[in-house]
Image (cartoon, rainbow, N blue to C red):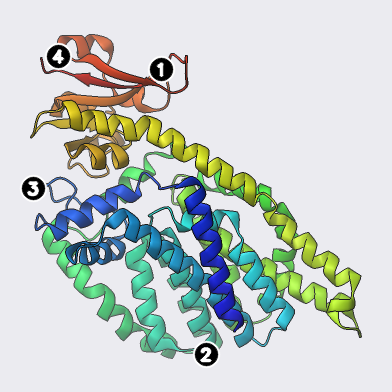
């Protein structure tokens, strides 16, 4: 019953976390708008008529579109699916330990540490594909360890369509599987299931968009200056859970004893350095896969250390064993603080992005367009055609941003409305100067200060009377 209990407790904690703060990420609404447009018959697009693949998670988008087609409300559905995925991750973390012959204390440590990880809990209900993606990684590790290669191909295909960075885990699995078997047979057994899942998408996306590669992937690489590099931000997320690191090193050292067991370590290293040297920004929702592997390895290390210190007596009677387990759990002592921060973050999102979206819906004539950087809430709440000044979902913008022409989108598209930061953040880099705005008739019509009394404000400009 331990995997079932682990799933139940993880689901209960993630549900309570979400109900406390209702944290729902901006980017989740980008994919949801794609899904709702497909369900409504407009195609898998953000703006009807513009075939741009601006979501990096086609599997999540297609799944949500199917659920929207049968009448489910997508923001709520995405939250529920993410929380259920988190429960599955906790359960599979226990099964992983059981499968490799780990002791009960290690299984308990995996259930407890994975199920209470503040970063995993926060993103479980965020509406993003993140929690589902982490669940697929856990499933991939489980099937790889059991050498169930046919099923592994299907899960690997789903992983790749959930997030392109899954390629690093697939590569690590191929290398370690072939090394362990001293042949290419594992790859040949994986390939049919993988192609069954991925090939229809690659062919369909090439025909529909011109390429199966997400436009948003190229756009996000240009945001490193705004978000910061991946490795630096990953270090910032690890610091609050620093107590886990020594145990993760112990667990990692144990895993490196054989190629078949080394996938969590190889996957973690390749993921972190691949994201960093691939010039991906350190967005917070990119961190949970790596943190899951850190927590999983820490559970293994803590369980092993606790059993080693128990010596000949029961671990339940060993003070040293309890000290180890409590020490590992201290890595998650900031969970309440994380819940409060999520609540503050969501309040800020609703007060700024949410309110701007509602205001645009109220004042903008039907058929008008708005240029904006944070397109999730504003695009979804307003329902307007969006000119994405970062280039994720709008065609022909990324190339100009890469060439250094940062104001290209607004200058050439001249939308009826602009929703931009004034006096704060990165948006001013993407906005023409005041003289151009004046010349083209843009004037501020609504503004929300970033904080009471602050001069920086999220501002709507209009060129309509």
Determine the CA span between mark 3 and mark 1: 34 Å
Q: Can residue 85 be seen in this view?
A: yes
Crowding at label 3, few (<14), some or many (≥20) Cα neighbours within 10 Å? few
Residue 45 drawn above or below residue 365: below
Residue under numbered circle 1: 423
- Counting from the top left corner in percent of width and height, residue 393 is at 23, 45
- At mark 2, the secondary structure is helix
Q: Which residue is drawn at 17% across and 25% down?
A: 363
Q: Is residue 253 left or right of residue 3?
A: right
Q: Nearer the viewer, residue 218 or 351?
A: 351
Residue under numbered circle 3: 49
Q: Which of marks 1 and 2 is nearer the N terminus?
A: 2
- At mark 3, the secondary structure is loop
What is the tally of numbered marks visible in this picture? Answer: 4
Residue 265 drawn above or below residue 35: below
State the mark number for residue 440: 4
- At mark 1, the secondary structure is loop
Viewer-side label of 3, 2? 3
Determine the CA span between mark 3 and mark 4: 26 Å
Q: Nearer the viewer, residue 237 or 256?
A: 237
């Amino acid at each position: 019953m331990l995997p079932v209990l682990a799933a139940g407790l993880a689901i209960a904690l993630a549900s309570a976390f979400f109900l406390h703060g209702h944290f729902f990420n901006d980017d989740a609404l980008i994919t949801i708008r794609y899904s709702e447009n497909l369900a409504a018959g407009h195609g898998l697009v953000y703006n009807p008529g513009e075939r741009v693949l601006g979501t990096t998670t086609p599997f999540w988008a297609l799944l949500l579109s199917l659920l929207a087609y049968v009448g489910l409300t997508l923001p709520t559905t995405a939250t529920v699916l993410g929380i259920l995925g988190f429960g599955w991750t906790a359960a599979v973390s226990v099964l992983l330990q059981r499968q490799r012959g780990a002791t009960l204390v290690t299984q308990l440590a995996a259930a407890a540490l994975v199920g209470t990880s503040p970063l995993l809990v926060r993103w479980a209900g965020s509406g993003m594909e993140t929690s589902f993606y982490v669940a697929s990684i856990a499933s991939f590790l489980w099937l790889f360890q059991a050498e169930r290669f046919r099923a592994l191909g299907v899960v690997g295909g789903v992983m790749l369509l959930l997030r392109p960075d899954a390629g690093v885990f697939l590569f690590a699995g191929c290398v370690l599987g072939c090394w362990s078997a001293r042949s290419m047979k594992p790859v040949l057994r994986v390939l049919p299931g993988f192609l069954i899942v991925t090939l229809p998408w690659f062919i369909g996306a090439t025909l529909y968009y011109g390429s199966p590669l997400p436009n948003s992937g190229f756009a996000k690489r240009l945001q490193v200056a705004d978000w910061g590099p991946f490795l630096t931000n990953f270090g910032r997320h690890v610091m609050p859970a620093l107590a886990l690191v020594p145990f993760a090193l112990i667990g990692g050292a144990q895993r490196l004893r054989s190629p078949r067991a080394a996938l969590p370590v190889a996957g973690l290293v390749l993921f972190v350095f691949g994201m960093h040297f691939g010039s991906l920004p350190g967005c917070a929702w990119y961190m949970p896969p790596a943190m899951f592997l850190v927590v999983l390895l820490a559970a293994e290390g803590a369980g092993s250390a606790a059993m080693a210190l128990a010596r000949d007596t029961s671990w339940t009677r060993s003070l040293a064993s309890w000290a180890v387990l409590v020490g590992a759990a201290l890595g998650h002592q900031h969970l309440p603080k994380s819940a409060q921060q999520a609540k503050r973050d969501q309040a800020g999102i609703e007060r700024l992005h949410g309110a701007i979206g509602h205001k645009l819906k109220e004042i903008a004539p039907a058929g008008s367009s708005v240029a904006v950087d944070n397109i999730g809430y504003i695009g979804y709440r307003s329902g307007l055609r969006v000119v994405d000044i970062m280039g994720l979902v709008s065609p022909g913008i990324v190339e100009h941003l890469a060439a250094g022409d940062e104001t290209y989108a607004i200058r050439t598209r001249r939308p009826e409305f602009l929703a931009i930061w004034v006096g704060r953040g990165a948006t001013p880099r993407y906005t023409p100067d005041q003289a151009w705005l004046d010349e083209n008739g843009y004037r501020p019509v609504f503004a929300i200060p970033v904080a009471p009394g602050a001069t920086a404000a999220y501002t709507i400009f209009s060129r309509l009377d």
